[in-house]
Amino acid sequence: MSSFFLIRLEPIYDKESNIFVDKFNNQYGNFLQDNLQKIELQFGDFKEWGSFSTTTGWSALTTKNIYYKKTGNLVLVNFYLDGTSDATSAQFTLPYTASNIVDIYGTLSYALNNGVAVNGGRCYITKNTNILVCKQYPDTVWTNVNQKIVAGQVFYEIV
């Protein structure tokens, strides 16, 4: 699975030439290439988790893509679940238990309820659990019939 990173570029001031230069300028080396390689080594490849995760909210899933990367005590999860709804909830288990410091909140990048696109959604992990709960905004319950999709990405700290 391929990955991408969003990197914020900021110019730096070169005192010798009295100008601002970007970090990609050859005189400073290939900043992007060097650092992307370090990031890839740090995070590694995404690992498949969907086949191990327990889901609630679907009678059958046509797609259950859950992938994660872990580095140190930080976990990144990408998910896309699509199937037939059988409950007013939508949640699944994660590979690691979240820290006990604070609840984690994220947004759904895409959601479908009863076959209709949702106008916003959120996901959260309660501290000290390994369950990601997906909600519609503003806390509208899912229908328990027809197609339900949740998709998004979340970072969380682990114990």
Image (cartoon, grey):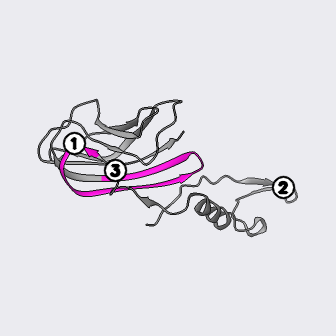
- State which mark lies toward you, 2 or 3: 3
Q: Is residue 142 left or right of residue 103?
A: left
Residue ID at (45%, 60%)? 47
Residue ID at (29%, 33%)? 137
Residue picked out by circle 2? 18
* Disc assigned to residue 53: 3
Q: Residues within 10 Å of mark 1 (few under 14, many from 20)?
A: many
Local SS, label 1:
loop
Disc 1 from disc 2: Cα separation: 61 Å
Q: Is residue 91 left or right of residue 24?
A: left
Instruction: Tell me whether circle 1 and circle 2 mark residues in contact (CB < 8 Å).
Output: no
18, 106: nearer the viewer: 106
Quick check: 55 above or below 136? below
Q: Locate residue 124, reporting x and y percent.
A: 39, 36
Say whether disc 2 or disc 3 marks the residue closer to the N-terminus.
2
Disc 2 from disc 3: Cα separation: 56 Å
Residue ID at (78%, 68%)? 27
Disc 1 from disc 3: Cα separation: 13 Å
Q: Locate residue 21, reporting x and y percent.
A: 74, 59
Instruction: Tell me whether circle 1 and circle 3 mark residues in contact (CB < 8 Å).
Output: no
Q: Residue 3 magenta-drawn?
A: no
Residue ID at (32%, 53%)? 80
Residue picked out by circle 1? 57
Q: Amino acid at mark 2?
A: Asn
Q: Residues within 10 Å of mark 2 (few under 14, many from 20)?
A: few
Which segment did they paint magenta? 55-80
Local SS, label 2:
loop
